[in-house]
Amino acid sequence: MADKAVTIRTRKFMTNRLLSRKQFVIDVLHPGRPNVSKVIDVLHPGRPNVSK
C-alpha cells in the first residue's frame, strides 16, 4: 500500500517577543490518512502546552 500525501501549511507566522516564542497556525490536509501528529512533531518540534 502506497503512502497517501500529507500537506502541511503554516500561516499567520509571528514572533512573540514578550513570551520569547514563535506562533503560527498549521493547516493539515490528510485525506485517506487517519493520524499525522508524528509528522507534525518532526517538522515543528517544541514543548507541549501545559495549562494549570
Image: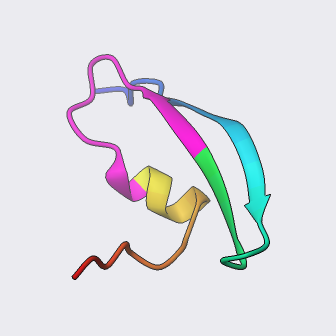
Camera-nearest residue between 25 and 36: 25
Residue furthest to the front = 18
Q: Which residues fall within the magenta stretch?
A: 25-38
In the image, is 10 to the left or to the right of 29? Answer: right
Camera-nearest residue between 46 and 13: 13
**Colouring:** rainbow
Is 36 above or below relative to 30? Answer: below
Name the residue rendered at 73%, 76% in the picture.
18
Name the residue rendered at 47%, 52% in the picture.
40
In the image, is 49 to the left or to the right of 26? Answer: left
Residue furthest to the top = 31
Give the image quarter of residue 34. Answer: top left
Is 44 contained in the magenta span? no
In the image, is 33 to the left or to the right of 26? Answer: left
Question: Which quadrant of the rendered structure holds the C terminus?
Answer: bottom left
Is 19 above or below relative to 29? Answer: below
Is 4 above or below relative to 25? Answer: above
Question: Which quadrant of the rendered structure holds the N terminus?
Answer: top left
Name the residue rendered at 64%, 56% in the picture.
23
Image coordinates for residue 51, horizontal then vertical, percent: 27, 76
Image coordinates for residue 15, horizontal then vertical, percent: 78, 61
Image coordinates for residue 12, horizontal then vertical, percent: 70, 37
Name the residue rendered at 79%, 72% in the picture.
17
